């Protein structure tokens, strides 16, 4: 009997603590939104966060999209040739990149780059009493640290996705004309004629949601960091893992919402 | 005036404060002594609302600190943290002028910078450090920048958590004098934590000793040497043997 109930009890505990932390994260997200709409707003922190999160993520997001687009073109060509459908490469690359891979892979890269650095920075501030110091200097840590980062990530992630879309399609195009024998004009017309606004638009909306998740996880785990270097290390790890899992989970939900028949 | 009544605070099984009673009259300098880890920093953080006490009450000017408007309340305080707690993304002068550059009483940048440099001078730092970043400074210099930040907005109530730890004896003397000046000239109410007995004698009007989660002894600094309390005697003479356990 014990052998049966013990794993169940463990499972129950895991589910309960998972739900409890989901509740805490939701409360944190709610507090962030409340502080967003109430002054003061720290513009300098916001612009700095845009630079750190948006601009400086361009190379990694761009490279990811470029190589993914190229690989995608090869796979679709190989798969398509099994039933004489090699010609759909431009369309499927465009669709795959704009709807799924552009936003998801871009966001995962940003999660690795940004959620970790936010969690480590805020966690270190927590551990070295800088968060307490902010409070005593009448500056709300949520307004000064969380709001600028979350807003910057939410606004700049769609732009990163747009750049990623363009470069991903370009990666497919390069492979298409150099390795797979497409003509430049066919590839481009096939792409542009096929793509609809919502293919790109849905990816941008996903990007905004993923950006929100990335910065929120970084801030949440940073603010709740344990003590010492180990605490900060743990916070960083949890931020990246939970941001990545939440990106993938919410991607599925958004795809259901947008595209399920 | 600060009145702390029957304050309790535990972290898990670790009961740190177990019924602290303390009264600091307006314009007085109270020094808190006690072994490390006895909860002195926690006590100051409770007053500022950075740590939530389990039970007990804290009143400032007769008002319960949990029921006041936070911004206006905190604007009256300055705090030097034990580790300095400087913002490492900001330069030294921006740290010192942090409060002056923000909020309702916001000053123009040039003026805030000037005040910051003046405060840095008072803690014995040259204007050249103003543009440097905290990570470029030694521990003792960081501590003094933290002190300059605590006094920059000329608060009515100032908390100093180990202001002279990590400073050379001469610089410690300068800081002791500065704290005394702030209390006498600005009429500020001060609570200072220190282990340094020369600092206690230089700064204190009154002394309180925290031990075992309670105020073990409190009285005017002049009566400290004459008290028969064995805990106080052991502490001020730095004896290894006595009622205070060396292992704790
Ligand atoms: N945020 C915290 N979480 C858990 N324990 C804490 C926390 N802050 C302080 N403590 C514990 O409270 C005790 C007193 O700490 P502190 O007030 O910093 O001592 P000190 O008298 O040296 O300033 C220590 O045992 C410390 O570990
Ligand atoms: Mg301390």
Image (cartoon, rainbow, N blue to C red):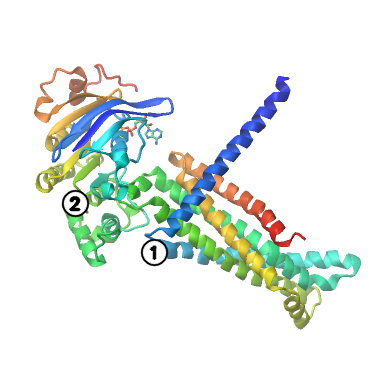
| Residue placed under numbered mark 2 in the picture | B154
Asked whether the residues under marks 2 and 1 belong to the same chain, the reply is: no
Residue at 17% over, 30% down: B207
Q: Horizontal placement of B16 versus A173: left or right?
A: left
- Residue at 46 percent across and 50 percent down: it is A31
Q: Chain of mark 1?
A: A
For residue B183, the mark is: none
Q: Percent position (x, y) of residue B58?
A: 27, 35
**Residue B167 visible at all:** no
Q: Which residue: 56% across, 54% down?
A: A213
Position of A151 with respect to A44 (left or right) is right
Beta carbon of the mark 1 residue lies under 8 A of ligand 1: no
The answer to which quarter of the image holds residue B189 is: top left
| Disc 2: host chain | B
The quadrant holding residue B136 is: bottom left
How dense is the environment of label 2, judged by Cα within 10 Å: few (below 14), some, or many (20 and up)? Answer: some
- Looking at the picture, how far across and down is residue B33, in whole percent? 22, 30
Q: Choose between A207 and A226: the one closer to the eye.
A: A207
- Secondary structure, mark 2, is loop
Residue position for label 1: A44
One can see residue A120 in this view: yes
* Quarter of the figure that contains the N terminus of chain A: top right
Going by the picture, which residue comes out furthest to the bottom?
Answer: A185
Of B98 and B248, which appears nearest the observer? B98
| B120 vs A8: above or below | below
Residue A21 placement (x, y as % from top left): 55, 41
- Badge 1 marks a residue whose secondary structure is helix
Comparing B11 with B177, the one in front is B11
Circles 2 and 1 in contact, beta carbons < 8 Å: no
Q: Check the image and report above or below for A113 versus A130.
A: below
**In the visual, does A12 lie left or right of B111?**
right
């Amino acid at each position: 009997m014990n052998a049966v109930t013990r794993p169940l009890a463990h499972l129950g505990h895991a589910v309960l603590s998972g739900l409890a932390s989901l509740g805490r994260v939701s409360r944190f997200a709610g507090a962030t939104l409340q502080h967003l709409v109430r002054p003061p707003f720290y513009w300098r922190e916001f612009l700095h966060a845009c630079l750190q999160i948006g601009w400086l993520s361009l190379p990694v997001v761009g490279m990811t999209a470029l190589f993914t687009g190229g690989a995608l073109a090869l796979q679709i060509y190989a798969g398509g040739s099994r039933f004489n459908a090699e010609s759909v490469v431009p369309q499927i690359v465009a669709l795959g990149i704009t709807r799924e891979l552009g936003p998801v892979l871009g966001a995962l890269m940003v999660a690795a780059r940004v959620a970790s650095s936010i969690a480590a920075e805020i966690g270190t501030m927590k551990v070295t009493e800088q968060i307490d110091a902010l409070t005593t200097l009448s500056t709300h840590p949520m307004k000064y640290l969380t709001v600028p980062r979350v807003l910057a990530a939410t606004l700049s992630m769609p732009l990163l996705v747009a750049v990623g879309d363009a470069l991903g399609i370009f990666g497919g195009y390069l492979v298409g004309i150099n390795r797979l024998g497409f003509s430049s004009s066919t590839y481009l017309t096939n792409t542009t004629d096929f793509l609809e606004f919502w293919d790109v638009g849905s990816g941008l909306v996903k990007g905004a949601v993923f950006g929100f998740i990335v910065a929120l996880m970084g801030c949440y785990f940073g603010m709740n960091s344990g003590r010492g270097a180990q605490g900060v290390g743990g916070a960083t790890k949890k931020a990246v893992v939970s941001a990545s899992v939440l990106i993938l989970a919410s991607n599925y939900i958004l795809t259901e919402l947008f595209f399920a028949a | 005036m600060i009145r702390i009544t029957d304050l309790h605070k535990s972290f898990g099984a670790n009961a740190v404060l177990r019924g602290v009673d303390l009264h600091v009259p307006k314009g007085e300098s109270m020094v808190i002594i006690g072994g490390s880890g006895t909860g002195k920093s926690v006590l100051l953080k409770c007053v500022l609302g950075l740590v939530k006490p389990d039970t007990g009450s804290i009143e400032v000017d007769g008002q319960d600190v949990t029921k006041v408007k936070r911004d206006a309340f905190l604007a009256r305080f300055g705090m030097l943290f034990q580790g300095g707690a400087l913002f490492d993304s900001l330069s030294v002068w921006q740290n010192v002028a942090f409060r002056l550059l923000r909020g309702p009483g916001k000053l123009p940048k040039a003026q805030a910078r000037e005040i910051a440099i003046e405060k840095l001078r008072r803690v014995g730092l040259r204007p050249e450090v103003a543009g440097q970043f905290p990570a470029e400074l030694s521990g003792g210099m960081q501590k003094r920048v933290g002190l300059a930040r605590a006094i920059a907005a000329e608060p009515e109530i100032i908390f100093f958590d180990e202001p002279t730890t990590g400073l050379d004896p001469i610089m410690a003397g300068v800081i002791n004098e500065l704290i005394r000046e702030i209390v006498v000239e600005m009429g500020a109410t001060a609570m200072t934590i220190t282990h340094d007995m020369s600092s206690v004698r230089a700064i204190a009007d009154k002394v309180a000793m925290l031990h075992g989660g309670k105020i073990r002894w409190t009285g005017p600094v002049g009566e400290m040497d004459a008290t028969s309390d064995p805990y106080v005697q052991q502490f001020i003479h730095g004896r290894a043997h006595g009622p205070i356990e060396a292992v704790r």
